[in-house]
């Protein structure tokens, strides 16, 4: 009686990028985490792969990059089965050969609000905020996130959160 073996895969910066417990192994599933150039988590999710831990570790060790950088010219209306994930290029291992947008459970945005211009979402106002008093220079701050909606017919359906800040970098929302 016990949980069984748990496997871990690390990138070249010794950050955990993949893990698999006994239950996930029975289903050929791996949990994954992706990071930006500042070491912040930008995405988490679950992917399908029959490859073993050593195969994934070798691929991670040989990857050309271990970080993702947000791309402003992202087209959310044509995500495709592979390629960019919510504006990040999906180059770091596990890369676009393994991860698609439908595998993403959470995605996080930092430093700017560019992701709003590339997201097909309705922006709702809230009481006491008219948008005129928000801080636009938000380097180093979390500006938004999206969380997967499970059980729906659309594998790309996400709930979006946007964080605005005042001139003292206090969150307004």
Image (cartoon, rainbow, N blue to C red):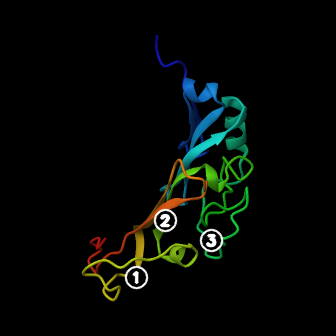
Identify which residue is drawn at 41% across, 68% down.
140
Q: Which residue is mark 2?
A: 109
The residue sitting at the front extreme is: 153
Cβ atoms under marks 1 and 3 closer than 8 Å: no
Q: Residues within 10 Å of mark 2 (few under 14, many from 20)?
A: many
Q: Secondary structure at mark 1?
A: loop
Left/right of residue 121 with respect to residue 27 in the rendered view = left
- Which comes before the other along the chain, label 1 or label 3? 3
Counting residues from the start of the chain, the first of labels 2 and 1 encountered is 2
Q: Where is mark 1, residue-wise? A: 136
Q: Which residue is mark 3?
A: 71
Locate residue 54 relative to residue 11 in the image: left or right: right
Residue lying at 65% horizontally and 76% vertically, measured from the top left: 73
- Residue 173 locus on image (x, y percent): 31, 70
State left or right for residue 43 relative to residue 131. Answer: right
Q: Nearer the viewer, residue 27 or 132?
A: 27
Q: Relative to 28, is 8 on the left or the right?
A: left
Q: Residues within 10 Å of mark 3 (few under 14, many from 20)?
A: some
**Residue at figure coordinates x 61%, y 67% from the top left:** 87
Cα distance in 3D space between marks 2 and 1: 14 Å
Mark 2 lies on a secondary structure that is strand
Mark 1 crowd level (few <14, some 14–19, many ≥20, 10 Å Cα): few
């Amino acid at each position: 009686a016990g949980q069984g073996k748990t496997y871990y895969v690390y990138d070249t910066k010794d950050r955990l990028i993949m893990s698999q417990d006994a239950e996930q192994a029975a289903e050929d599933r791996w949990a994954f985490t992706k990071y930006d150039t500042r070491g912040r988590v930008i995405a988490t999710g679950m992917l399908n792969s029959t490859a073993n831990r050593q195969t994934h570790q070798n691929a991670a060790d040989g990857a050309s990059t271990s970080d993702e950088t947000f791309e402003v010219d992202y087209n959310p209306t044509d995500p495709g089965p592979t390629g960019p994930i919510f504006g990040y290029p999906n180059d770091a291992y596990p890369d676009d050969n393994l991860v698609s947008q439908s595998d993403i459970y959470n995605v996080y945005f930092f430093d700017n609000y560019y992701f709003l211009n590339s997201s097909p979402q309705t922006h709702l106002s809230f009481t006491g905020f008219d948008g005129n008093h928000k801080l636009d220079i938000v380097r180093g701050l979390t500006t938004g996130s999206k969380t997967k909606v499970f059980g729906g017919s659309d594998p790309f359906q996400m709930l979006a959160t946007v964080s605005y800040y005042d001139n003292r970098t206090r969150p307004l929302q």
